[in-house]
Structure formats: structure tokens, C-alpha cells
Amino acid sequence: MINSLVQDLQALVECESPTSDLLGCAKVLEVANEITARVIGSRAEILEVNARPVYWLGSKTPQVLILTHLDTVWPIGSFTPLWSVNGDVATGPGIFDMKAGFIQGLYAMRGQDLSKVALIATTDEETGSATSRQLIEDVSKVAKAVLVLEASLDGKLKIGRKGTSTYQINVFGRAAHAGLEPEKGVNATVEISQIVTTLIGLENKDLGTSVVPTVMNSGTTTNTVPALASLDVDSRSFTLAEMKRVEVAIRNLKPSHPEARIEVTGGINRPPLEIAATKELYEKCEAVAVKLGIAPLGSASVGGASDGNFAKQLLPLQSLRNHLNIFTPIA
């Protein structure tokens, strides 16, 4: 079984599927369905949800939902070769996040009664699940548990995840000639730089709250006072209270110049997966491990979010490690 599982993983990895490549995402689901037909003996249904393909195997009203995705963050051509194995380590785009998880979930379903379980693979997870979020929330309402098969680096069960927020801040000033009459301008670059300092001050490392200015743009020419500046912000926290604190602060940013104007868009995307929401299911997983003779699984809280952050609002949820220990997956 191990050899066939690894071969199937290779087939998925060699089918590149960055989120932005809709054709690539459709193709990787075709490959997944060919594998499904061989492993399960029947094909999954490929749905179109808001113009994006979604893989669905099993019940439409599952008691257990196995949640995966087959899109990746890697642009086409990021890896040469696409697939390589060195000892017990396989490398390629999307192995860790999360094509290996899909393959393991699929093989775990072989020979099982599919009337009470579903395996879903979306294709927009890496960019926030804008098109698939409603589907995930709807099916989670009827499930008793959700398993998110995304591995953790040290093999523990993920029982906590930070929530994510993204913001774009635009500052509107007034252009003027930088040499002849700079005093007539309102410098948007100066304003945005002061905002960066304010944002950094919103972090709380003790609580795991990060506020990270990422992409910034301003100005048009070297001799013009910039009339417009923009800034993207990534903020994450383990608690919703912290996320709301940061959001209130960002939405209430004030310019230092009375004639400058600040516009904020965006907000909370994925709420945090707080440990209290996963405690019961985690304890059940540890109990099952004991029955199977597996060493204690252990737990971890991580900074990355997943579709499980949506589902956790509705039912117990767990992100599972790589139980088969076939290889140590890398990105």
C-alpha cells in the first residue's frame, strides 16, 4: 500500500495547481478523481461552486467531514524537478499543504461505509476560501466532527490556530511640486509611514497577536509630493477578542495632517480556532491512539489558519498529523 500511496501523491504533486490557475485546479481534481476510482472503486462528484471546482466524495450529510484542499501557494515552475525523494523526505509543491493529507484521507476511506463520511477538497483555500466558505459552513452544520488533514511540522495534532485579518489602508493627500511648492502638498508617504509605526505598536507578543505591514506603495514621480499611499496589513491572533481589539484600532486610525484622509478596507477573514473548541475531539483522538497502540499524539497551536477555522464555530474540529509516517513532508 505504501508504494501505491506515494505514487498517487506524486501524481497529485506533479499536477501543479496554484489557486490563481483555475485550469490547473480543475486538472488536479481530475487527477484526484482518477486516483479515487482506483482506490475507492467509484468516483467522487466534481461540483462547481461559485465558478470553482470542488471535489466531494461520500455523504452529503456526513457525521464526519474530512476537509482538505488541493490548491497550492506555489506559482507554476517554482520547483525543478516537481517531485523528488531523498531518503524519507519527499519534496514538491503542495506536499505539506496539503496534497499528502488528501491522499491519506482517501486511503483511510477505502473499504469504509461512505454513507456517514465525506471527503471534500476545495481549490481556493490558500487565498481565503472566498468561494467555498459557505459550502464548508453548510456541511459543517450537519457533521458531528471535522478532521482537517493538514500536517504539522512536528507531527502533533493542531488544536489551536490563529485567526487571520487582512486590511488595506489608503491615505489620500494632495500632490504638489516637491521643489517649487512642497508646502502646498499633503504628503501621503509621510502619513503612511506614521501609520506603520502605529500598527507595530498594536502587537502583543505575549498573547501571540501579530500586526504585520506587508505591501506598501506611494508616489508617482521623484519630484512630486505623493497624493496617494497604500498599505496592506496581515494581522493574526489566537483569540477573537484580540482580533477585535486590533480591528477597532485600525478602523479608528487618524491622520496627523488635518487635510489628509484615511480609508480602511478588509477585516477579519478567518476567526481563530480556539483550544476550547477542539478539547473534546482531541481527547477522543488520544483515546483512539491508545487503542491502536500509537504513542501519544501531542498537540500544538499554530499561526497559520485553515478552513477548519470556519467549521469550528459549528462543531468540534481537529487538524490531524501525518499518522502513516511514510515520509517527512516538506512544503
Image (cartoon, helix red, strand yellow):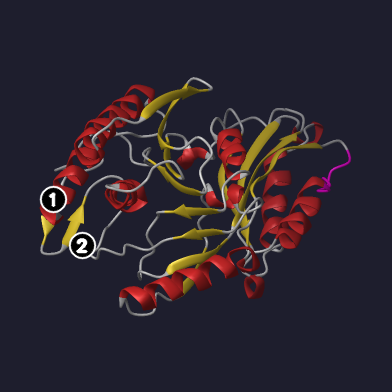
Quadrant in which residue 238 is drawn: bottom right
- Crowding near pointer 1: few (<14 within 10 Å), some, many (20+)? few
Task: State the CA–CA distance, disc 1 to disc 2.
Answer: 12 Å
Q: Is residue 36 magenta?
A: no
Image side of residue 295 versus residue 245, left or right: left
To which residue does mark 2 refer? 327
Q: Residue 138 at what x, y percent from top left?
A: 61, 37
* Figure check: 47 above or below 211: above
Residue 226 visible in this rendered orientation of the protein = no
Relative to 280, is 98 on the left or the right?
left
**Which secondary structure, mark 2?**
loop
Mark 1 or mark 2, earlier in chain = 1
Residue at image location 60% in from the left, 59% down from the top: 273
- How many C-alpha atoms fall within 10 Å of the one at disc 2: few (<14), some, or many (≥20)? some
Amino acid type for the residue under numbered disc 1:
Ser
Residue stretch rendered in magenta on the structure: 252-258
Q: Is residue 267 above or below residue 279?
A: above
As helix, strand or loop, the secondary structure at mark 1 comes to strand
Amino acid type, residue under disc 2 in the picture:
Phe
Q: Is residue 278 above or below residue 67?
A: below
Depth check: 186 or 2 in front?
Answer: 2
Q: Residue at x 47, y 35 (%)?
A: 124
Q: Residue at x 78, y 35 (%)?
A: 186
Give the residue pinned by disc 1.
Answer: 84
Q: How many marks?
A: 2
Q: Dividing the image into 4 quarters, which one contains the N terminus?
A: bottom left
Q: Hey, which quadrant is residue 140 in on the image?
A: top right
